[in-house]
């Protein structure tokens, strides 16, 4: 949680307030922070961590990691569990569990509290639990819990924890602006200029030309399985339905008559009016405006001359106008003629000058005259009810265990079966099959569910849907050895060359530390090494215009002056050696105050995030945290696919 604070505070504390929920309800939010408890979805086992009086079981952590992984795949469809864990996913989720439990216990000790009613309100407001009508749907709520393998009690604990985070962290994390004195050092840091030298040692120059044989390549594949793994693929069966699929009963004449009778006031004679009005701060100003209008000026021109503006209402009934003003004003306004000027009249906002702009008289409409309007409205209502009933019937069928083939057959829907699809929705291999772009929500949902489980995806809100099931799952795995042997050989050669490039880089760095210049050390290292280039710039220019910061510059701006560092280039492309020769940082007190003020404004939220980070650290310190590192490592190996499941 806290490692993401720096980014999430780009919109102040608002995003942080959603941290407690996303690992459980990944469809609803963008960040995560979750609670700890002894069990999760009925899974128990050994405890991987103890947070005060809360135990975090290995089963809970395992499932939370899987939920976080499934959410991450929505943004990176090709991600595997192994790569997710290797990039820090397991440790981040554990930290979220720990910090969530620590925050809750710390808040309770300080006297904060929540209520069942607050939690109920949060559940009702979450879009992920909304049905076709847009309102909270108990069936969808239960289905979500079932699909994600969690209990309502666990969900409520998560939401309760979110409320504690809001109460405790929001006031601390909201910092509008830093004082100039605090912003000066940061301004100086941004204006800092650095210059250094760098050289590149390409791995290709030292890659062996030999073939090590199948045994060596198979071993290399085992050691680098993640790099060659094809993401999980799924075969889907789906059928589409929309409003046209749901039979809509005809509107009967007696229904029209009943509606007409129940809404008699709507069809009886009525009068609505439009008004132009200006509110003046005092009676003298209002009298001046009224005099000009009575003299022939428009109310808009008279108001503008007084430095005010007039507004025109929509068509209003007398009751509506009474609600906006008062009974006395409404009585006078509806007794006046078109063009009459009313006032000045004192109101709660000031002195009102009002002109009757238009009078719309609506005579009583007979049943025959009102029938087309009533019929149209009833047909619309029946269509809405029909699609809701149709949707719910399909939802009940799939919740009851009906096969997708049965659901489609009973309702005469066309059933489509896809080839194995990647999380992106593309076929895994050569294929003429193309999935319509509108089905992207279905694919995303399919990669969250279980094999054989019926689900419904909303394609167009309240209009179009897909009922589907995952027919089969092809687990993420490398292709057959023979199929990728050529790629393995190439990759192995570059990996071997990378080792030589690494040793060369370290030798060059050691020589520079011994007193040689970088150019001298490069010449002494032998051939096939790039020339020495000058690199540098100002810190404020890094990442400008949304461009990524080159790794060598990122390292240069983190080094101590006069030091030398080595940098591995990803993908076995080689190594770099970088030396920092010159650092020029201006005196903070000599920086233009306007520049300091410009930096102070965006630093406020960042400073708030640092305070929240310290608060989280203090919460963990107060409640005391113990982690079973051996058990955590066993779970890491299990998730990586290199060990048996942890019990």
Image (tube, rainbow, N blue to C red):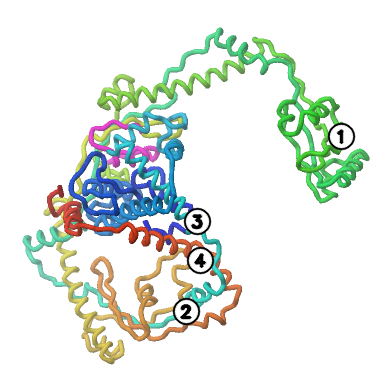
Q: Distance between the residues labelled 3 and 2?
A: 33 Å
| Numbered badge on residue 341 | 1
Q: What element carries label 4?
A: helix
Identified at 52% across, 61% down, the residue is 175
Magenta region: 429-456
Asked if residue 55 lies left or right of residue 356, the reply is left
Quickly name the residue at label 2: 192
Residue 352, horizontal then vertical, whole percent: 81, 39
Q: Nearer the viewer, mark 4 or mark 3?
A: 3
Identified at 53% across, 80% down, the residue is 588
Q: Is mark 1 on a helix, strand or loop?
A: strand
Q: Distance between the residues labelled 2 and 4?
A: 17 Å
Q: Is mark 2 on a helix, strand or loop?
A: loop
Quickly name the residue at label 3: 171
User: To which quarter of the image does residue 537 belong?
Assistant: bottom left
User: To which quarter of the image does residue 571 belong?
Assistant: bottom left
Answer few, some or many: residues within 10 Å of disc 2's Cα (few below 14, many 20 plus, some between 14 and 19). Answer: some
Q: Nearer the viewer, mark 2 or mark 4?
A: 4
Going from the N terminus, do you reach mark 3 or mark 2 first? 3
| Numbered badge on residue 603 | 4
Answer few, some or many: residues within 10 Å of disc 1's Cα (few below 14, many 20 plus, some between 14 and 19). Answer: many
């Amino acid at each position: 949680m806290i490692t993401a604070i720096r980014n999430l505070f780009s919109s102040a504390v608002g995003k942080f307030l959603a941290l407690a929920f996303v690992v459980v309800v990944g469809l609803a939010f963008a960040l995560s922070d979750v609670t700890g408890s002894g069990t999760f979805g009925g899974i128990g086992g050994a405890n991987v961590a103890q947070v005060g009086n809360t135990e975090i079981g290995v089963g809970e952590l395992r499932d939370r990691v899987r939920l976080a992984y499934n959410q991450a795949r929505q943004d990176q469809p090709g991600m595997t569990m192994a790569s997710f864990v290797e990039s820090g996913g397991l440790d981040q989720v554990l930290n979220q569990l720990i910090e969530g439990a620590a925050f809750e216990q710390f808040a309770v000790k300080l006297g904060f509290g929540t209520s069942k009613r607050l939690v109920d309100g949060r559940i009702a407001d979450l879009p992920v639990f909304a049905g076709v009508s847009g309102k909270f749907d108990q069936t969808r709520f239960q289905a979500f819990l079932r699909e994600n393998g969690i209990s309502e009690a666990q969900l409520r604990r998560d939401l309760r924890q979110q409320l504690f985070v809001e109460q405790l962290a929001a006031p601390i994390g909201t910092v509008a602006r830093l004082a100039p004195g605090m912003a000066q050092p940061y301004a100086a840091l941004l204006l800092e200029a650095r210059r250094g030298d760098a050289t590149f040692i390409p791995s290709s120059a030292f890659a062996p030309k030999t073939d090590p044989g199948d045994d060596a390549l198979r071993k290399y594949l085992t050691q680098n399985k993640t790099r060659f793994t094809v993401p999980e693929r799924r075969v889907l069966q789906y059928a589409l339905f929309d409003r046209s699929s749901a039979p809509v009963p005809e509107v009967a004449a007696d229904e029209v008559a009943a509606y007409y009778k129940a809404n008699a006031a709507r069809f009886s004679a009525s009068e609505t009016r439009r008004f132009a009005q200006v509110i003046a701060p005092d009676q003298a100003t209002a009298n001046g405006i009224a005099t000009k209008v009575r003299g022939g000026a428009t109310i808009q021109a008279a108001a503008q001359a007084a430095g005010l503006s007039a507004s025109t209402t929509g068509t209003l009934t007398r009751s509506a106008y009474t609600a906006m003003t008062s009974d006395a004003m409404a009585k006078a306004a509806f007794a006046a003629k078109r063009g009459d000027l009313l006032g000045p009249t004192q109101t709660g906002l000031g002195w009102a000058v009002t002109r009757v702009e238009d009078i719309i008289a609506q005579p009583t409409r007979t049943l025959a005259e009102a029938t087309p309007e009533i019929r149209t409205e009833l047909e619309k209502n029946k269509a809405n009810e029909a699609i809701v009933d149709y949707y719910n019937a399909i939802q009940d069928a799939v919740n009851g265990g009906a096969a997708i083939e049965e659901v489609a057959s009973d309702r005469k829907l066309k059933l489509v079966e896809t080839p194995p699809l990647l999380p992106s929705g593309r076929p895994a291999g050569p294929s003429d099959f193309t999935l319509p772009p509108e089905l992207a929500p279905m694919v995303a949902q399919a990669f969250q569910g279980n094999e054989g489980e019926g689900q419904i995806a909303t394609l167009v809100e309240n209009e179009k849907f897909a009922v589907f099931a995952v027919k089969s799952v092809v687990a993420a795995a490398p292709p057959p050895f023979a199929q990728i042997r050529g790629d393995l050989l190439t990759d192995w050669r570059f990996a071997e060359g990378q080792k030589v490039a690494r040793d060369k880089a370290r030798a060059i760095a050691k020589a520079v530390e011994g007193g040689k210049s970088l150019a001298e050390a490069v010449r002494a290292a032998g051939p096939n090494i790039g020339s020495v280039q000058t690199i540098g710039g100002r810190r404020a220019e890094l990442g400008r215009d949304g461009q990524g910061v080159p790794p060598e510059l990122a390292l240069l701006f983190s080094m101590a002056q006069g030091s030398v560092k080595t940098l591995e280039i990803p993908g076995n492309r080689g190594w770099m050696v970088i030396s920092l020769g010159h650092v020029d940082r201006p005196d903070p007190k000599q920086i233009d105050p306007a520049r300091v003020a410009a930096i102070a404004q965006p630093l406020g939220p960042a400073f708030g995030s640092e305070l929240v980070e310290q608060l989280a650290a203090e919460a963990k310190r107060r409640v005391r945290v113990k982690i079973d590192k051996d058990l955590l490592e066993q779970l890491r190996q299990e998730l990586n696919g290199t060990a048996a499941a942890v019990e």
